[in-house]
Amino acid sequence: MAYELHYWPMIQGRGEFVRLALEDAGADYVDVARQDDESGGIEPMLGRLSDPANARPPFAPPFLRDGDVVVAQTAAILLYLGPRLGLVGASERDRIWTHQLQLTIADAVDEAHDTHHPVGVGLYYAEQKPEALRRAKGFREERIPKFLRYFERVLAANDGGRLVGSDLSYADLSLFQLVEGLRYAFPKAAGAALRDTPKVVRLHEAVAERPRIAAYLASERRIPFNEDGIFRRYPELDA
Amino acid sequence: MAYELHYWPMIQGRGEFVRLALEDAGADYVDVARQDDESGGIEPMLGRLSDPANARPPFAPPFLRDGDVVVAQTAAILLYLGPRLGLVGASERDRIWTHQLQLTIADAVDEAHDTHHPVGVGLYYAEQKPEALRRAKGFREERIPKFLRYFERVLAANDGGRLVGSDLSYADLSLFQLVEGLRYAFPKAAGAALRDTPKVVRLHEAVAERPRIAAYLASERRIPFNEDGIFRRYPELDA
C-alpha cells in the first residue's frame, strides 16, 4: 500500500524533507493534499488533525500514513522511513547519529523560518518587519556560517562525501534541502558562507544529480519556492 | 560504566529533560560540568565540542557520553536512553509515537525560549525587550493553550494517565518539565491554561510524586529556575 503524505499543498515547507526521502527511494506514495480528485485536497489532512477518534493525533502537518500507523513531526517521520527506504545505516549507532544530524538541520530550518516570523506565526510578515530585519542579521552573520561549518566539519571527518558512512542517508537529502532553501532565501549570505564549505556544496551537487532527485526537481511535483513557505526571499532580509 | 551528561552547570535548560530521565530510572550518571573536582567543570564539554579528532561532534550541549558513543540533541539522547532506562514501550509503534510527542514538547520549549530571545541568541534580553513583549503575547494567548490542549487530548484518549500506554515514558517526564517551566516563567498564563487541562495537571502531580523524582527535586542536584535558562520569569512577559 502506498504511503500517504499529508501536508500543505502549495509550499515545500517541512513536508519537502519527507518528499525528498520518498522520491529518492522511488517509494510508492501519494501526496494527498495535491491530488485534485475527490480523495485529495486538504480535507483529509484537516479531518485527521481534528478527529476525536484518533487516539494518536498529529500536532501539525506534515504527517505520514502507512496503513494504520500515522507519524507526525518531520524528524520522526524520517526516523520511521529511514530503515524502510534504505536511507539510514543498519546499526543503532549510525541511526542515532543520522537522527542527531537531522535534528540539527531542523534547528537551522526553524531559525530560517523565524527570520520572517520572529514575533509569531499568528501574524503576517508585514506586521513584524522591523523585528525580522534584526533577527535576519544575526541569522545571516552568525547562524548560517555556524550551521554550515558544522556540517562541513562532519563531512570532512567522514571519507565518503556523505554525512554518515559511505551511503546516502535522509540527513544528506535534508542538508541538500537546507542549502536549497538558504540559497533561495538568502542568496548573498548563503553564497558567502558556502564559499567556505566546499564539501557541503559538493554534497548538494551530488544529491541534485541523483537520477530520481533530478527527475523530481524537474517535475511538477517539486513546488517552486515561494513566500508562503519556510524559506522566503525577502531581499531586505539578505541585505 | 556511568553515563556522562555534559551540559551547562548553572541552568536546567535542555539538559534537564535528560537529567529527569536519568534520575527517574535511578541510572548511574555523572553531571560532568557540575563536578567540582579536577574531572569536572565545563572544560571537558567544551573540549569535546571543539575536538577535531571527534568525527561525530555535537553541535551544542547537552550531550551524553556512554562509553565511546556520544549523543547530542535532547530528543535524540532520550531516543537513545529510552529503551536502556525502561522509559519507552517495546514496540516500534510506541517508540515512534513517544518520540513524536517529545519533538512536540521540544517545539513548545523552543517557543518558550524565543519569548525572551525573539531576535536572536547573540543578544541579551534587554536588547530585545520590545520584540519579546510582542512575541510573549502570542505565546501566552495562543501557543500555551494550544500545546497544553493537545497533550490533554492525547491523555484523554489514553486510559492510563500517561501519554503512551500505561507505563511512564520519557515524554511524560518531559511534559512534567514543560509544565514546571511554564508555571515558573508564565505563572498567570500557564495557570489559566492549566485550568482547562486537568489531565496534564494530574500527570504533572503524578510525576512529582514518584519517589526518585521527589528526591531529586528536593536535592541540590535540581538547579533552581533562573533568568539564564530557557524558562525565565520576566513579569512583563506574563502581563
Image (cartoon, coloured by chain):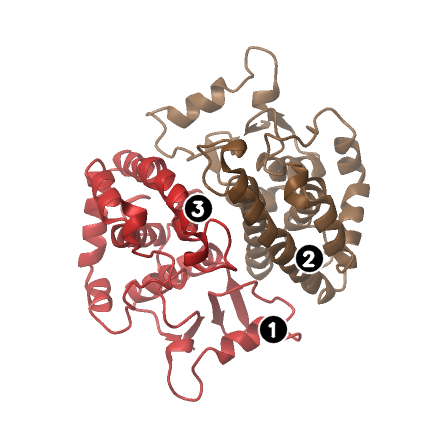
Chain colours: A brown, B red
Circle nearer the viewer, 1 or 3: 3
The image shows residue B136 at horizontal and vertical percentages of 37, 44
- Residue at which label 2 appears: A163
The amino acid type of the residue labelled 2 equals Leu
Expressed as whole percent of the image width and height from the top left, the position of residue A126 reads 54, 32
Compared to residue A231, the image places residue B182 above or below, namely: below
Quarter of the image where one finds residue B184: bottom left
Q: Which mark is residue B50?
A: 1
Local crowd size for mark 1, using a 10 Å CA cut-off: few (<14), some (14–19), many (≥20): few
Task: Measure the alpha-carbon separation of dots 2 and 1.
Answer: 18 Å
Real-space CA distance between mark 1 and mark 3, rounded to the nearest whole angstrom: 33 Å
Secondary structure of the residue carrying numbered label 2: loop
Name the residue located 60 percent from the left edge and 73 percent from the top edge: B50
Residue picked out by circle 3: B131
Identify which residue is drawn at 30% across, 37% down: B145
- Are callouts 1 and 3 both on one chain? yes
Residue B160 at least partly seen = no
Q: Amino acid at mark 1?
A: Ser
Q: Earlier in the sequence, mark 1 or mark 3?
A: 1
- Whether B221 is drawn above or below B192: the answer is below
User: Dot 3: what SS?
Assistant: helix
Pointer 2 chain: A
